[in-house]
Amino acid sequence: MPPADRERTAYAPLFDRADHTTAPDRTTKGPTMDFDLSAEEREIRDWVRTFVRKEIVPLEPQVLERERRNERGLTADELKSLQDKARSSGFFGIQTPESHGGMGQGAVVAALIEIELGRSFVPFRFAGEADNILFSATEEQQETYLRPTIEGTRRSCFAITEPGAGSDARAIRTSARREGDEWVINGEKTFITGGHEADFVMVFAVTDKQKGADGGVTCFLVDRDRGWTSTPIDTMGEWGPAALVFDDVRVPHSAILGEEGKGFELAMRWIGKGRYMLPARALGSCERLVEMGMEWARNRVTFGQPIAERQAIQWMVADSAVEIEALRWLVLTAAWQVDRGLDSRQSQSMAKLYGGVKANEIVDRVLQMHGGMGYTRELPVERWYRELRLLRIYEGTDEIQRRTIARNLLKGHVSVRGHLG
């Protein structure tokens, strides 16, 4: 489709066609390697790209100004307005099954969308999503928690990290003891994303000290009105986590999500998704940052020449481009493995590690290209600098990813030849 025609039809609904399938068919026999996108994947990606460029990027100056005043970048009403506009064209619940009103897309499409959203720092996300582990809920729990979360009338948070149990999630001390048909939860969680805004929490507690993480951790769905409290934690970035306190919080036995003692498996399933989606968003940020850096370098003149003519700047651009391309394939390989039903944990750890390290190197180079202006809060470079630094910490630190990757190799669980063998 010519660019002009694509622009005219960019906001046409994509998901009312009779021949729509929930995910690209990757089972057809053909060439053993195919690095192209399917027609549907490309159409979805291009729609999101247009949406970001036309609807989100123009909001950036206003968002920066608000954040400089320590205000929320987007109000709840503004976010909902954008989400409603996207929903009118079929973008609702990217990975939510069609049976729950979503698009039912796979990991590759979700990663492609996250890359495009990452090209702006505006805190936008499409509506219609729920934590993947909520789909393990009973029918009654789905009515109370899953479906309202998908529709946006309830907000959840995931709580496993504790003051003494961050990277070592097996060291959690929050406990739940059974008293008749109730469980009594005591403990503290920290750095919980959305913890101060959520009205219910998926909290992980030790229910059998002897078994610990090997069958002794259980996940509970706990409404805020059960008595847990939250306190915001101020950070160097715009991420606003919270500390949660459970002081003799009582819940019924029916509040267990999944099976008793199987909470650690649920937690790892939740964390695993972030290990390819977070670097996907960082990838989009890096693309945009390097584009900004190149534009600045073409126009910034020193000693009679644009700094783009300087070898030092050219090497920054070249190194960044190579790293962006490598990250792209690490992210998409991990997502492709998820769609194929393969064990993607090693690839996810590699994408998370490489994405965190290289995104920080790239934003640092781009700030350096901009000199003093890059250090100001007038441009979004320093904002991205603070935001991307977090990528090396949450959902598994660099050190944990290296430990996981090396351990899998040394124990023979995987090969340095990768999944191709």
Image (spheres, helix red, strand yellow):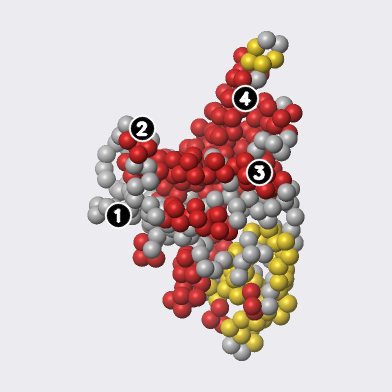
Q: For the residues marked 2 and 3, what is the alpha-carbon distance in whole angstroms?
A: 31 Å
Depicted 305 relative to depicted 31: above or below: above
Determine the CA span between mark 1 and mark 2: 23 Å
**Cα gap from disc 1 to disc 3, whole angstroms:** 37 Å
* Precedes in sequence: disc 1 or disc 2: 2
Query: What residue is disc 4 on?
Result: 296
Asked whether the residues under the numbered discs 4 and 2 touch, taking CB atoms below 8 Å apart as contact, a structural biologist would say no
> Mark 1 = which residue?
16
- Per the model, the C-alpha gap separating discs 1 and 4 is 43 Å
| Residue type for callout 4 | Trp
The residue that label 2 is drawn on is 3
> Which image quadrant for residue 9?
top left
Q: Choose the circle earlier in sequence order: 1 or 4.
A: 1
- Pointer 1 and pointer 2: residues touching (CB < 8 Å)? no
Cα gap from disc 4 to disc 3, whole angstroms: 19 Å
Local secondary structure at mark 2: helix
Q: Which amino acid, by three-letter code, is at mark 3?
A: Leu
Please say if the residues under marks 4 and 3 sit with CB atoms less than 8 Å apart.
no
Amino acid under label 1? Asp
The picture places residue 70, in percent across and down from the top left corner, at 72, 51
* Sequence order check, earlier mark of 4 and 3: 3
Q: Position of residue 97 (x, y in %)?
A: 39, 61
